[in-house]
Image: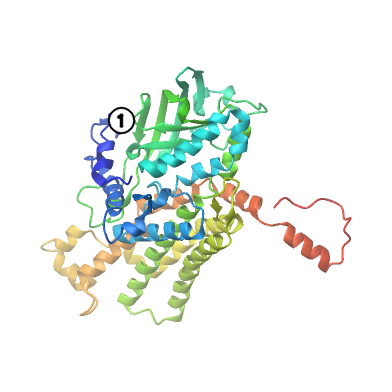
Amino acid sequence: MIRTGGQYRESLRDGREVYMDGERVEDITAHPKFKPLIDIRARIYDMQHETDKQDLMTFERDGERFPIGNQIPRTQEHWQAKRKAVDTLMKDIGGVVTRVGDETVGEMWSLADGADILNEIDPRFAKNINTHIRLAVENDPFHVSANTDPKGDRSLKPQEQDPDMLTHVVKETDEGIIIRGAKYETAAAYSNQAFLKPTIANWGDASISDYALGCIVKMNAPGVKHICRAGFQRDGLQDDYPLSNRFDEVDTIMILDNVLIPWEDVLFYQHTRAAAFIRTTLHRYSAMPFVQRLITYADMMIGAALWNVKQTGLEKQPAVQEKLAQLAVYREGINAHLTAAIAMGEKSPGGFLMPNQSLLMTGRVHACSNLPAMMHIARELCGGQICVTPDIDSFRGKETGKWLDKYYTINERWKADDRRKLLSFARDLLNSGYAGHRLTFHLFAQSPPFAHLAAVYRNFGWDGPLDFVKHAAGMSDNIYGEKTDG
C-alpha cells in the first residue's frame, strides 16, 4: 500500500549509522543537510494520497492503491503514466530530483529479464528477484541503486590488491552471505534499501567469482555505514542559491563492514555471466525516467534564458532567437527519443514492455553529451550578470540597497527584486558548485560516456544499413565477413 510522508520519515529513524562532516547524525530527518530532500521524498508519498494527484501518482489494483513509479510496465499506457507522474512531481516541487526511486527500481526488471541465467546458478535467485519486484510495488519503499565501488588500481585484478576495493562475499552461513566493501550511492543515507550489483570490473578469467554479486541491502543493516559528502546547503543563502538549498541530493560512500545478506535477498552470487548480463542491460528500463529528468532541466534553462532576454528587451534579436531555438531542439530531441522509444517498444524476455533500446540509448547520449553545450548557451543568454550580481544582503542593505534598486530595476514592469530572483536562480542553475555537480552527475550517474555509446552500439540495428548498401551496390550474397551484431 502507498505510504505517507510521515511513515517514510519514521522509517528513517531506525538506528542507521550516518555520518556528515565526520560526525554521527542521530536523526537525519531533522538534519539541515538531509531535511530538504527528505521533505521532497515525503512530499512524493503525500502526493499519492491527495485527491487531485492520486490518479496521476498511483494505480489501483483489487481496491488498493500502489505507486505508479514501481508499477511493472506491460503496456505503452504504463510508460505514459510514469512520464506524467514524473512531470507532475517536478512541477509540484519546482526543480529536479533524480534519486527518488522510480528511476532505480527498473534495474530489478532488467535482472528479471535474465531469469534463465539466474536459474543456471540457483532457481531460488530468479524467485528472489520476482519477489522483490512484487514487494517494491506492494510496500512502496524508497529504493536506490548501489553500483560504483572505490575500485583502487584498475590495472590490477581485485584479487591482486586490497580485496575490499570491490564489494565481495567473504563467507557463507546458514542465514545468508557476509559481504565486505564499499559503494558510492546518491541518496542512500535516506533511502530504505538498495539493489547492489557489480561495477564495470575485471573479474579475470574465472567463471565463478566472489565479486560477481547482486543483492538487496537494507540501509539500517548492522555493518552498513553511510559516510556522506558535505552538502551545498548554506544557512542564510537560500535566496541567493535557491536550488542548492532545496535540491541537493546527498551522495554517500556506503561502507559494508561484514554485512549479512539473508538468502532471500541474494539475487545472484558467484556467477560472472549474471554479472555481465546485468551490467549490459542495467538501464534497459531505468534510462527512461533518468533521461526524462533532463527535459525538466532543459525547461529550466529555457525559462531562465527566455525570461532574461524578455527583461532586457532582446527577445526580437535573430541571434538570440537562434540560441533559444538550439535549446528548444535539445529539449524536443530528448522528448522525441523517449516518446518514440515507448511507441516502438517491444516485449522483453521477462514479459515487460521494454522501450525501444536503440532509441532510448541514443536519446540518453543526446541528452547527456549535449548538456554542457546547452548550459553554456543558456549562460550566454542570461548574460554576465549571473556571475557578478551581489547577494541578497546587499539588496537589503541600508546604504547599498538604494543603489542596487536603481541599477537592477529595468522599467515599470521589471523591478529590482524580480531581476535579482531571476539572476540568482540562473546562477545556481548554471554557474554554482551545485550546477557543476549536476553536470558531472549526469555525465557518470548511469555509467560514463563510453558505456553510453557502447549501449548504443549493442542496440542499434546494424543489419539494416549493411543489407541496404549490399543491395544498392549490387554486392553478392557471399561477400567476406559476417553481419555485425545489432
**Residue 327 in the image: x percent, y percent?**
46, 68
Is residue 141 visible in the rendered image? The answer is no
User: Residue farthest to the left?
Assistant: 398
SS type, badge 1:
loop
Q: Residue at x 46, y 57 (%)?
A: 78
Left or right of 457? Residue 248 is: left
Is residue 238 visible in the rendered image? The answer is yes
**Residue 323 in the image: x percent, y percent?**
46, 72
Q: Quadrant of residue 88?
A: bottom left
Q: Amino acid at mark 1?
A: Arg
**Residue 157 in the image: x percent, y percent?**
60, 27
Q: List the residue tagged with mark 1.
A: 16
Q: Quadrant of residue 185?
A: top left
- Up-down relation of residue 433 to residue 338 (above or below): above
Left or right of 353? Residue 43 is: left
- Up-down relation of residue 249 to residue 243 (above or below): above
Q: Quadrant of the N terminus?
A: top left
User: Residue farthest to the front?
Assistant: 62
Q: Residue at x 56, y 24 (%)?
A: 210
Q: Residue at x 73, y 61 (%)?
A: 464
Residue nearest the observer in this picture, 150 or 64: 64
Residue nearest the observer in this picture, 281 or 66: 66
Identify the colour scheme used: rainbow
